[in-house]
Image (cartoon, rainbow, N blue to C red):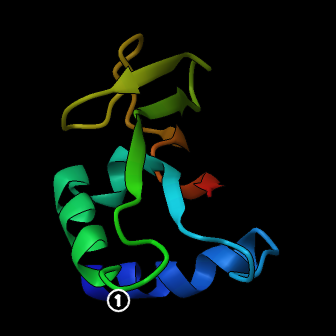
Amino acid sequence: MKWALHFRLSKWLPQQFRMTWEGVCCVEKVNLKLGKLTAIVPESLRLCFNIVNRDTKLAGANLCIEEIPIIAKCCDCNAQSKISELPFICKECSSGDLDIISGRELIVTSIEVA
């Protein structure tokens, strides 16, 4: 699955940002938000990104990953808290009835081209 994700990224970027590769010498940086719940290891993503994008305009691009923590809101007491370990329970009232607010992201926020 990770290889498929990286392969698609090189085709997806131009579509997502409504750009063409015409006039673009190379991509210098890809900025990405990556939620902890995606279960994607940032270093593995960088390694695969570099391998899959050899001989493309993304070759040599720096993949900057902003890791997004898991934030949950308790449905019982409305407290919001950062969750860093299992079990996912409210730190205020110990309820397990939580809505995940962040942590699922896999978003390319911007790209820098030369």
Q: Which residue sits at x=49%, y=51%?
A: 29
The image quarter containing residue 89 is top left
Q: Give x and y (percent) for residue 66.
A: 43, 38
Examine the rendering and report whether any part of residue 68 can be seen: yes
Is 44 situated above or below 43? below
Front one among 83 and 98: 83
Residue 73 placement, left or right of 42 = right
Q: Which residue sits at x=34%, y=21%?
A: 94
Front one among 55 and 40: 55
Residue 28 placement, left or right of 95 = right
Q: Give the residue at mark 1.
A: 4
The image quarter containing residue 15 is bottom right
Dot 1, how many residues are within 10 Å of its Cα: few (below 14), some (14-19), or many (20+)? few
Q: Give x and y (percent) for residue 50.
A: 26, 69
Q: Which residue sits at x=56%, y=87%?
A: 11
Front one among 17 and 69: 17
Q: Quadrant of the N terminus?
A: bottom left
Front one among 14 and 72: 14
The image quarter containing residue 23 is bottom right
